[in-house]
Amino acid sequence: MRPGFRQSMAWLHTWSGLVLGWLLYAVFFTGTTAYFNQEITSWMTPENVVRADPSIAAINAQKWLVRHHPNAVTWDVVLPGARGGGTRVSWTENPSAWEADTSGAATGSIQLDGQGLDTPAPRSTSGGQFLYGFHYELHYVPYRMARWIVGLGAMFMLVAIVSGIITHKKIFADFFMLRLGKGQRSWLDAHNVTAVLALPFHLMITYTGLVTLMHMYMPWPELVRPKPPKTAPVAIETSITPAAPLTALAPVLKDASKKWGGTQSARIQYHHPGHTDARIIVFPAKTKDIAEHHGAQVFDGVTGSAITSPLSTSKAYIIESGMVGLHAGRYAAPTLRWLYFLSGLGGTVMIASGLLLWVVKRRQRLPDAEHPHLGFRIVERLNIGTIVGLPAGVATYFLANRLLPPDAVGRADLEIRFFFIPWAAFLIWSTCRPSRRAWIETLGVCALLFALVPIVSALTTTRGLFPSLLARDWVFVSFDLVMITTAAASAFGAWVIAARKPRIDRPRKARPALEPVH
Amino acid sequence: MINCAIFLLTAAGFLALLLADPRYRRDWLRHELAPKWCTALRLAGFLLLALPLIIAVRRLNWGYGAVVWFGWLTISATLVVSAHTYRTHAWRPRR
């Protein structure tokens, strides 16, 4: 007989969620940290205490870019502001090299200080930018391929969300239902609750995530439509116009600020700097507009005169930048930023619980629990190695930031290796141990690593938890508290598994009658 | 300030909705309520959830207010679920 609609949706949900589940977990986890990427970068550059001055930083950052990347196609300068004292500068070199190139070579970024100066940094680091980048670039994967993989994952996620909603069927009746200590039932409840309570976020973040890269996934409309005029702030191709020096930046910023009624600029983008078709796009600080490019002003990069962009008034463009803005949450004030962060955490837990549910459900049906089939073992081990291993890698990334010698060669890359190597080690470790032991041990070590972060930070810098509390340095205080909370959560997880020995080890045989099998 | 108001109202709303359902109410109240009280609670719950949206949209703006409202909905629902789970598991002997 043909299976019912709901059953086929349940099947679709199970497999679309499983196939790329670990990738989605990694994307959600690192993407969630990205809501605080500037704060993480501040924490990872503890010596950087220069008083931030956006207008000086802007001019110095431009000087730095002219000196170091004169041939780049685009520059992007995120000025210091309310969220952290550094100036983030990034650039894109020859875009035709993207196809073949690995990420990082054709595009790059560097953290300058609060006045845009390349002060000999006591410790070079990629900071929060690495975690942010990982969530759609996957670091070692070539530029386009990484975005395609993540896009595929997002598409699967969207399928899993919609089919999950259909499968759930009692969203409102079981809205508050979370029964603990009942094995598979509890995992299903936990998966449902984390999914339903943050459902608006899950749908929004997955859909808008696809939108951020839609020009790459679906380039056809742009291929057939006539080329937009050159004022458009989207042209990412090599300039064919002759070289020309850039205009002075200060009058441009003053002009922009006047049009915003005194608001300072937060971000400056350059297209084709050093050519006659150069454009400078300036974004306002402190706005409650979600749309990323809303209120942005375009200037001619050579003459410095304002240009009215036809794009900024287009409805489609505003909707697109609204979605991108909603995804990245750069507009969000601190409270809303925390809400984003917590919802992202909910999404991460939802994915993890879904992956665990797959295992829990099948473990009960195994003919021989001692020797499960290969597929089961792969999923089980990947679960442990990723769900615990990835956060542990983040902890060692932070620890490496504090412990590596400041003058180590290629220090920023070395830090990143301290993210991947421990993660790989956790994956290997989880395959070598019996699953229950693997959970307890990895969670325990993960807890220890996170607990070490504030301790090591207090020992190696002058900005530990207590000095930061006294200095009312809330970024550093919150960072350490999040580390301690994560450590506590991991330790609690290890403790719960260790305390419930019999139920985990012999799930089915002891209590077949209690749960009705449908 | 406005965040605090949105949080308290949505939390109260979810609490009312929780109590409106007899399956959850048993764990919180000693006596069964009359059906008209259930309807009243449910209505109050939805109103308490809708009210902060209006406040948020008025005081902030459309987009920002709506995002803030959705964010607080998630937080307060999570807290109500946690409170309920804690209560039911702290009170009932483990089977």
Image: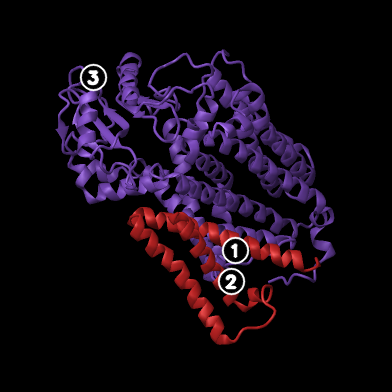
Chain colours: A purple, B red
Residue B92 visible (yes or no): yes
Placement of A477 over or under B42, stated as above or below: above
Instruction: Mark 3 and mark 1 in contact? Answer it, CB < 8 Å.
Output: no
What is the distance, in whole Å, between disc 3 and disc 2 at their CAs? Answer: 63 Å
Determine crowd level at label 1: few under 14, some 14-19, many 20+ residues with C-alpha closer than 10 A. Answer: some
Q: Which residue does the image show at 50% across and 59% down from the upper left?
A: B7
- Which chain does the residue under circle 3 lie in? A
Name the side, left or right, on which A72 lies relative to A506.
left
Indicate which disc residue B80 carries: 1
Q: Quadrant of residue A85?
A: top left
Residue corresponding to mark 3: A274
Determine crowd level at label 2: few under 14, some 14-19, many 20+ residues with C-alpha closer than 10 A. Answer: many
| Quadrant of image for the C terminus of chain A | bottom right
Of B57 and A302, which appears nearest the observer?
B57
**Which amino acid type corresponds to the residue marked 3 in the rendered image?**
Gly
| Quadrant of image for the N terminus of chain A | bottom right
What is the distance, in whole Å, between disc 3 and disc 1 at their CAs? Answer: 58 Å
Name the side, left or right, on which A224 lies relative to A182.
left
**Which amino acid type corresponds to the residue marked 2 in the rendered image?**
Leu
Mark 3 or 1: in front is 1
Instruction: Mark 2 and mark 1 in contact? Answer it, CB < 8 Å.
Output: yes
Residue corresponding to mark 2: B18
Of A212 and A79, which appears nearest the observer?
A79
Determine crowd level at label 3: few under 14, some 14-19, many 20+ residues with C-alpha closer than 10 A. Answer: many
Q: Secondary structure at mark 3?
A: loop
